[in-house]
Image (cartoon, grey):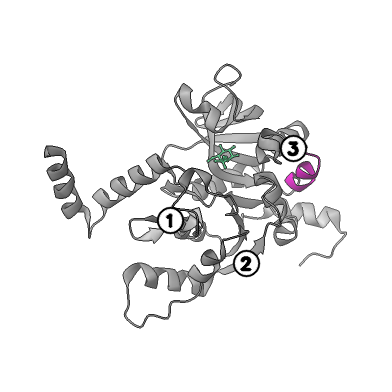
Amino acid sequence: MVAKGNKKTKTCRVNLMRVRKAIIPAAGMGTRMLPITRAQPKEMVPVVHKPVIQYVVEEAYYSGIRDILIITGRGKRAIEDHFDRSVHSKAEKYSEELDRILDEVNIFFVRQKEQRGLGDAVRYGESFVDEEPFALLLGDTITLPPCTRELIDIHQKYKTSIVAVEEVPADKVSMYGIVKVRELDEGVHLIDDLVEKPSVEEAPSNLAILGRYILNPEIFECIRNTKPGRKNEIQLTDAMRILNTRERMHAYVFRGRRFDIGNKMDWLKANIELAVEDEELGDGIREFIEEVMKR
Ligand code: G1P
């Protein structure tokens, strides 16, 4: 540990360090998944073998992270229970994998007191990250291969805050944070501006923030300076907009697959796509889909 108040040493530590902590916000209401989410968190909705949050924790683990803070809230207790060690004596592959991961990671939980937006939720991680750059993984999104791993490698090179983005069709820009960029390296861009959920007319591009970030700890000061925005909530995108005026930020165009489990259509598509690819279920599901399509 570096002594508190030794700002110069701390800055060195931040610059040399590989990202080793992650925050996973899982406090959102899951309105778009109702009534499935009346009594269970949207992060616990299953995708083939596992609840979505298990994919997210595994992504952090396979990206080299061993300290994880999950931000929960009202009605989210099932998430904590899921990350207890299994009590089942009969070994099951995916439960075993999780138990093995749990032996190596520390998972911490904190509850957001009021639903005041993503920016407000992230704020609860300030003392956990303790002046280190950290990964932020939204708890209702799956990326394959793990996007966080790629972001951490890029962060090693640039040391800036980095936001993963992907191109979306024009009719979807209003569902996401959108970035305006200048090309730098292949796939890595300097950010000029960021806007949370703009209309098609206002959108500066079709590059959408997909729910994976590496953020430098200066973001917390920016969140404190962020006024309520869309839906009268403290938006993380608005805080990053302030951060971008203070230091350089990059956007990374992720070329893998992203599944947004926060809405029913994408959740169902994720289940079908991943079940078809599954070694245990794939053949059966493919046959079943063909059969259904003939009806
Ligand atoms: C949040 C962020 C948005 C981002 C999106 C990715 O929105 O505010 O900037 O593009 O996640 O899924 P939400 O989906 O929580 O409305």
**Residue ID for mark 2:** 108
Amino acid type at image mark 2: Phe
Q: Would you say residue 138 is visible in this rendering?
A: yes
Q: Earlier in the sequence, mark 3 or mark 2?
A: 2
The residue segment tinted magenta is 219-226
**Number of residues whose C-alpha sits closer than 10 Å to that of mark 1, classed few (under 14), some (14–19) or many (20 or more):** some
- Queried whether the magenta region covers residue 220, the answer comes back as yes
Q: Can you tell me which quadrant of the image ligand 1 is in?
A: top right
Using the image as rendered, state which of residue 242 and residue 5 is in the foreground. Answer: 242
Asked if residue 240 lies left or right of residue 47, the reply is: right
In this view, 167 is above or below 6: above
Which residue appears at 31% of the width and 80% of the height? 90
* x then y, percent, for residue 256: 41, 40
Left or right, residue 196 beside residue 14: left
Q: Which type of secondary structure does the marked residue at label 2 adopt?
A: strand
Magenta span main SS: helix
* Residue picked out by circle 3: 228
How far apart marks 1 and 3 lie (CA) works out to 29 Å
Provide the secondary structure element on which disc 3 rests.
Answer: loop
Kind of residue at badge 1: Val
Label 1 or label 3, whichever comes before in sequence order: 1
Disc 3 vs disc 2: which is toward the camera?
Answer: 3
Q: Which mark is residue 45?
A: 1
Q: Position of residue 91 (x, y in %)?
A: 32, 77
In the picture, the quarter occupied by the C terminus is top left
Local packing at callout 3 (Cα closer than 10 Å; few below 14, some 14-19, many 20+) is: some
51 on left or right of 130: left
